[in-house]
Image (cartoon, coloured by chain):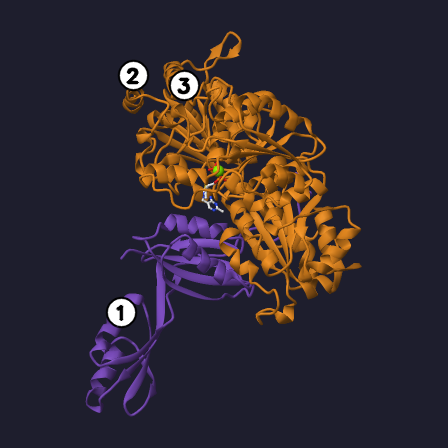
Amino acid sequence: MSTHTLAVLAENKPGVLSHIAGLFSRRAFNISSLAVGPTQDERVSRFTIVVDGASTPVDQVCKQLEKLVRVLKVVELSDGAAVERELALIKVRVDPAVRGQLLEVAGVFGASVVDMSPTTLVLEAVSSPAKLDALLAMLDSYGTCELVRTGRIALARGAGVITDDGPALTAVPEPADTAA
Amino acid sequence: MQELTGAQALVRSLEQQGVEVVFGLPGGTILPTYDPLLSSSLRHVLVRHEQGAGHAAEGYAWATGRPGVCMATSGPGATNLVTALSDAYMDSVPMVAITGQVGTSLIGSDAFQEADITGITLPITKHSELVTDVARIPAAIAEAFHVATTGRPGPVLIDVPKDVQQATGPWSWPPVMDLPGYQVPGPPSLTAISAAAALLVRARRPVLYVGGGVIKSDAHADLLRLAELCQAPVTTTLMARGAFPDAHPLALGMPGMHGTYPAVAALQEADLVVALGARFDDRVTGRLADFAPRATIVHADIDPAEVGKNRAADVAIIGDLRLTMAALADAVAAALPDGPDGRQPLAGTADWLAVLDSWKRQFPLRYTQDSDGPLKPQYVTERLSALTGGEAIIVAGVGQHQMHAAQHYSFTRPRSWINSGGAGTMGFAVPAAMGAQVGRPGELVVAIDGDGCFQMTAQELATCAIEKIPIKVLIFNNGFLGMVRQWQELFYDERYSSVELGTAIPDYVKLAEAYGCVGLRCERPDEVDTVLDKALARTDVPVVVDFRTHDREGVFPMVPAGRANDEIVLGPEFSADEQRAATRREMEI
Ligand SMILES: Cc1ncc(C[n+]2csc(CCOP(=O)(O)OP(=O)(O)O)c2C)c(N)n1
Ligand SMILES: [Mg+2]
């Protein structure tokens, strides 16, 4: 699957999430994953949106997103040039006999144990989506009973920074008589 | 700093924006705003249904180029605006809708007449805002007008809870707008302009494919200059009728599903298609893969998302069409050879124009009006066109009558054709004509409406009569949902399912009179001129004419939905030989 990762900066205002989600459903674009949270500037939220390039015209997605009045900036993060991470919490049923084995697997994938009961373990894994998929495949054979993933977040590598560099505030134009 | 209530600030902001008229209907949650409206310079036109207010605002905007404004209460008042908002969104009509909302503390509680109207209209507005702070009102209104009228125009909805209208806040104008994410494209790229000009100068079979953007950006004068400089034929879409005079030798008429043969075929054979404020809509392209198969595409539009959306562009020009067209015409003029009297038109398209002229002669819009036969809608339209010199403002509903009007009225100027193009909203004509007449009070505004459409919003005749808005409504009464009947005839083996309305109920003449309008009826071809003269002469009251038109008349030519434009059907007025010749389309250039 050819996925594309978009970084979308938007005003941190009510309704922005539904504007963005609504655009995807209205235009029949497919979202593989969406994650959103505040940035260092409290007025700005950052969305990381993963779309499937095979079923969705990514160029159209970007242009339509840019048209949303509350959206400040849309950048496609190119493959490999971005650090991509997902967090997962996984509850696994464990037989005491294989607990050691399981901890070894977790260790290989850099996952840590954040909760334990006599019959279960909760693992926390933060990694690239591919590595996370591999871990989940391994855990399946032990018995994953509950899984929650955050959706991908991504940041471009290197010194480049994505900022909201649009005009900050605009003055009101002369009334009426527009060339609309 | 002066203090005003939210309601006062709202009305004052509208005045400051230069608004002259608001179409609306009050109710509980918008009541605070209707009070200062009484002492305002704004004219309020009290409609009979909020959908009428919405379409009236649209008609006003189409006719004047200024944003239309409508107002409604929360819940059902607001949801009654939905169809008009969707219509304005599809046709890029600048419009601001103001709705009351239940008090802030009640939002989310299923309060009386609560509806999440910003949520409901999210996919059909360019922008919307629920204003929760009285101090935001001036800025919210200024932003609404800015967003509605700049870039690609569209509808904006401002929802104001009742307590916010009642609260007091500081007033100052102009407010500071806070739209950090809203950008209007700058001037077009000169590189793209020169690339397009070079293509135009070299093209042997160019077509200018003109859409509604040319009218919205007032670029018609440069369109004429460009077409004449390049000697390129012009086709005007349903959204662009009037952008180029139909009587001009370079005019091909309308393209698309019910376009003229020369327009449809010219696009299919073109080596260069220059799309100007048009969006390659499916009703124009037919089956997309087979549209204009040999053409290089230049696409000029203010909305970058339209370029490449349906058809890839070889040259993309993003920006205001008025600037684009002027620059393009200049660039073409500069590239033309010098003649004794300055720049000479290119001769490179002469063969192409000769072919197109022969198509115009061979395959015109054709219909037969027998002097004692049933009245034909095409004939009524042509007589109207002749009697008004193509100078009336024509507003159409949706259906066969709309297509006959678009095909047979000979338009002479922009903003004289108003219709529901993208959404195809039945019931558009009467209220939109009302709005157009309010915007251009001295002019002749004529709605050409279907009997089906008319019955969807006829109640606004009361508004027109009482407010002295003297529109003329010509009902093409064929007793059917004619366009649907035509599809059932052609694609469902003449199995007519729920399309017959009957011609007699209601009695449109009596209905008109009941609404305080003049009602006339016309059943025979020889009465048409007299009845039209009578109707057009009344400038004091609205007039409704019941034209009893032929119930089996179809709209042709026709490209069946989903088919290639090359499969254009000329219709029953043409022989099998003529149809074959049209399909084969022999030409050598
Ligand atoms: C609100 C709405 N409902 C249904 C349709 C589908 N439709 C398109 S044209 C048409 C028939 C219109 O009938 P009429 O107004 O009599 O016009 P005619 O085609 O007979 O000229 C219908 C039902 C529509 N476009 N809009
Ligand atoms: Mg009808």
Kind of residue sitting beneath label 1: Asp
The answer for which chain carries disc 3 is B
The answer for which chain carries disc 2 is B
Q: CA distance from mark 1 to mark 2?
A: 61 Å
Instruction: Tell me the purple chain.
Output: A
Of tags 3 and 2, the one toward the viewer is: 3
Q: Is residue B371 shown above or below B566? A: above
Kind of residue sitting beneath label 3: Lys
Coordinates of residue B192 in the picture (x, y in percent): 44, 33
The circle drawn on residue A133 is 1
Answer yes or no: do the residues labelled 3 and 1 have beta carbons within 8 Å?
A: no
Q: Which residue is mark 3?
A: B360
The answer for which chain carries disc 1 is A
Coordinates of residue A168 in the picture (x, y in percent): 59, 53
Camera-side residue of B253 and B75: B75
Q: Secondary structure at mark 2?
A: loop
Residue B169 located left or right of residue B480: right
Q: Secondary structure at mark 3?
A: helix
Dot 3 and dot 1 within a common chain: no
Residue B149 located left or right of residue B5: left
Q: For mark 3, does the 10 Å Cα neighbourhood hold few (<14), some (14 to 19), or many (20 or more) residues?
A: some
Q: CA distance from mark 3 to mark 1?
A: 65 Å
Kind of residue sitting beneath label 2: Glu
Q: Which residue is mark 2?
A: B588
Coordinates of residue A104 in the picture (x, y in percent): 23, 82
Instruction: Tell me the orange chain.
Output: B
Q: Quadrant of residue B577?
A: top left
Q: Residue drawn at (31%, 53%), measured in percent from left and top?
A: A55
